[in-house]
Structure formats: structure tokens, C-alpha cells
Image (cartoon, grey):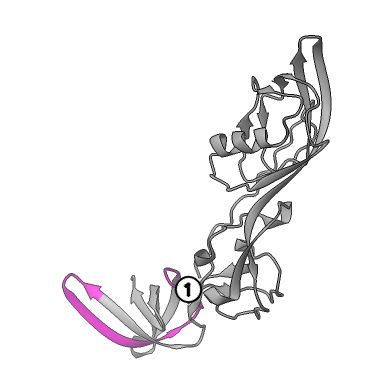
Amino acid sequence: MRRRVPCILVILFFVGLAGWSHPALAFTGVPIGGMTVGASSGPEVFLKAAARGSQNAVAWKRIEMIPPSFGISGVIVTPERLLPGIDSVTLGIRTPAGMVYRLFRLKWFLPVVVARSDIRRKETIRLEDLGVEILPYRLSFGENPRERNFFCGKVAKRTIKAGEVITQRDVGDRTLVERGDSLMLIARSGSVEAKIDGVALESGSEGDVIRVRIPRYRRDSRGVVVGPNLVLVLE
């Protein structure tokens, strides 16, 4: 069976004034160097910067910051870029009196898809099974499309409890062919098409290339899954 290549989790560490950072949804970060901040301004400046600079167009809804405001007025010098999702940052701010360095704790909130009710393993997910909530970002979210439609029609790889966040790791494509199933095999040569009975030697979803057996000719072949128990022979 053709196996899809899993996404590689790239872990980025920002050392120095920015501190250790979490891997996040926008790997290159957003530019904050040169931004002017006021004493009473707060995390909304980061939110605006993320909205302008995030290459992945993550819809961050709000950011909580401790302390809640910068407390001084000046221009951010370091770090030059901020990684969305980072849980803390030390800002170097140039003020009329000189450089001031302050540590801020951050909590980023974004929309995520959650289960409205329990979804059993191998159950096909329906739109009514899903909801969207605004929750603090966690590394365990991984890649989490915020659109419910992405998950509709997919199959749960594990039992998902009501209220749990659903990620791409939790779902897979619906299996159209199971190993041992009787199949209809389609063979094409130019404009000529022939159909013959076969048996699946592997399971597969739509688009997967699997091994099949053709009992009539006592040979095995390969084919692409094009429908329920329907395979287009490749060789």
C-alpha cells in the first residue's frame, strides 16, 4: 500500500533575548523590531503584527500578556521577529533614557475544531459532530485546520471524546478497499476498457496504489483505488 509521507515537525529554538520558544504555526515569525510601543499599550500590537506578517494566515483571536501592558514608551529593538505561539519573550526597548529589557509572558488564542460528541474509532466524521472554540494554543495541536469541512468525511483514527480538540493526526481518509475484498478491476489500453474480477491484497483509500490479484490469470498486479471496491489496473 502506498504510504503518505508524514509532515516533518520542525522544532525551532530561539536563544538569547527571545528565550526558548515553542514550535508554532508560523515558522518564520513576524517582524516586531522597530515597532513603537506606548506605556499603556499591550499585546494588541503583537496581534496586529501577526495578522500582517503570518505566512500561514493563522487566525489568532487574542493574546493575553503578563504584565498586561509594556509600562514604558519606546521602540522595540530586540528581538527583531516574534514567533506566534511563543509563551514568553524578553523585549529590548529603546527609550529616551536608554535601553530597557523586560520579560513578558504570553498566551495566544486561536479557533480550533473540537468534537461536539464522542466519536468512535473508525467512525466517519460528520459536520454535526464538530464545533469550533477559541482556545489557548498548545504544541499538541500540531497542524489544526480551523475549518470543520476539512474533517468531514474522514475517519477517526482513535476514539475522540466530546470537547477534545481534533487535529490532522486524529483522522485519516475513508478506506474504500479492505484487504481480501472482492474487487472490480478496470484495465484500459487506449480507448479500449475491460473489466474483470479481482481480490485486494492490501487496503487503501482513494488515490492509494495497492496490490491486487487477478484469479482468472493467476497473477498479481498493481492498481489505484478509484472508488469503493473499484481499482484501475496500472500494469
Can you see residue 125? Answer: no
Q: Is residue 190 in the magenta section?
A: yes
Can you see residue 9? Answer: yes
Give SS at disc 1. Answer: strand
Where's residue 82, x and y in %? 68, 32
Report the predominant secondary structure element of the magenta stretch. Answer: strand
Which corner quadrant of the image does residue 120 belong to? bottom right
The residue depicted at 67 percent of the width and 46 percent of the height is 62
> 34 or 15, which is in the foreground?
34
The residue depicted at 71 percent of the width and 70 percent of the height is 163
Instruction: Say which amino acid is labelled 1.
Output: Ser
> 48 or 18, which is in the foreground?
48
The quarter of the image holding the C terminus is bottom left
Q: Which residues are magenta?
A: 188-208
To which residue does mark 1 refer? 205
Where's residue 220, x and y in %? 41, 79
**Figure check: 74 above or below 27:** above
Q: Is residue 209 in the magenta section?
A: no
Where's residue 109, x and y in %? 69, 50
Where's residue 176, x and y in %? 46, 79
Residue occupying the far left of the picture: 191
> 88 or 202, which is in the foreground?
88
**Figure check: 135 above or below 187:** above
Q: Crowding at label 1, few (<14), some or many (≥20) Cα neighbours within 10 Å?
A: many
- For this view, does 143 lie left or right of residue 18? left
**Figure check: 195 above or below 171:** below
The residue depicted at 65 percent of the width and 27 percent of the height is 32
